[in-house]
Amino acid sequence: MHESVLLTESINNLNLNDKSIIVDCTLGYAGHSSQILKQIPNGYLYAFDQDKEAIKEADKKLKSIRDNYEIINTNFVNLKEEIKKRTNKVDGILFDLGVSSPQLDEADRGFSFHKDAPLDMRMDQTQTFSAYDVVNTYSKNDLTKIFKTYGEEKYASSIAEGIIKARANKEIKTTLELAEIIKDNVPEKYRRMGHPARKVFQAIRIEVNDELNVFEKALRDALDLINIGGRVCVITFHSLEDRICKHIFGEVSSTPKELQNLPIIPDEYKPKFKVIANIKPSKEEIEKNNRSRSARLRVIERSL
Ligand SMILES: C[S@@+](CC[C@H](N)C(=O)[O-])C[C@H]1O[C@@H](n2cnc3c(N)ncnc32)[C@H](O)[C@@H]1O
């Protein structure tokens, strides 16, 4: 079961009305999409996901509500091109980034360092590049760089060194082999502060799915697709994703610095968006669902 994060807050912030045209970029198990569909009897929902397993379950749920929706089985990097084939502008767009709990629980997807599985971590099972390729072919420098930037891992370099040594003997094929190598290459006291493989696994997942570049492109495209008065809501689980969102929202909601002192700002330089909210989960939600502890919801509205 996937427990949706910041559900009420994100749905309320989409400002739905019965005719709204909405895009859910991360359908998952349709937690958010179900709520959206219930509130837009005369509108339409477009929902993206690249995971066929999730889509099967989500489709059953949505069908039981109504049929004014379409599931688009592709990476949301294709958001603009896919939406433009269907309509010109939309009233709301939601991103609920990351992986769903069932993806983590399905051992054979290779996302979890607790369960033995082939090194995979592809969100799109038709892609060929996987965690196996990152771990067995990247140079020490490249491994260190991704562990540092995508995982904010303090021991990035010694873990990368450990991987290079281990794979010189034999290729690293499974999640538990990798988790063991990570454990052996961090100091004893670090091992007691949460699982030492957590950050490296996250970093490899971001690399395999090119998550940050994909998100940045899709978010900029989302802002182009939104109607005046429409909103984009983004739930992130990682400081780098949140930074991208904060930066882009800041950029489109402010007047360029060099024009800020002008007595009158020409219309074409007036910001088209205003930032509406920046919300963290409540204490109660974090107690109920530990996965929500690092989540953050940012909301922006097109005003011009
Ligand atoms: C956190 S889950 C969404 C859960 C959903 N909001 C719910 O309440 O059930 C994220 C989903 O987005 C999908 N996803 C992540 N990145 C994606 C991308 N670049 N393109 C398409 N789907 C993506 C994952 O496959 C996963 O099913």
Image (cartoon, helix red, strand yellow):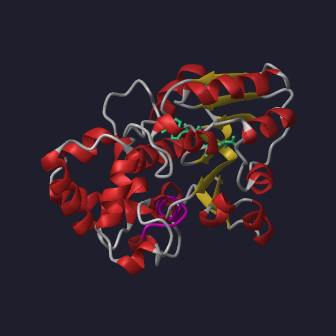
Tell me the quadrant of the picture where the N terminus can be found. top right
Give the number of marks: 0
Give the residue at x 27% y 64%.
159
Image position of 3 with respect to 195: above or below: above
On the image, the x and y values in percent for residue 100 come to: 61, 43
Image-quadrant location for residue 141:
bottom left
Give the residue at x 54% y 42%.
222
Res. 231 visible in picture: yes
**Magenta stretch: dominant secondary structure:** helix
Q: Quadrant of ligand 1?
A: top right
Q: Nearer the viewer, residue 75 or 86?
A: 75
Q: Is residue 39 left or right of residue 250?
A: right
Q: Is residue 174 left or right of residue 239?
A: left
On the image, the x and y values in percent for residue 124 come to: 45, 30
Q: Is residue 245 magenta?
A: yes
Q: Nearer the viewer, residue 131 or 262?
A: 131
On the image, the x and y values in percent for residue 157 come to: 22, 67
Q: Is residue 208 left or right of residue 168?
A: right
Find the magenta span and give its range: 244-256
Image position of 278 with respect to 63: above or below: below
Give the residue at x 48% y 36%.
109
Res. 276 visible in picture: no
Q: Is residue 125 magenta?
A: no
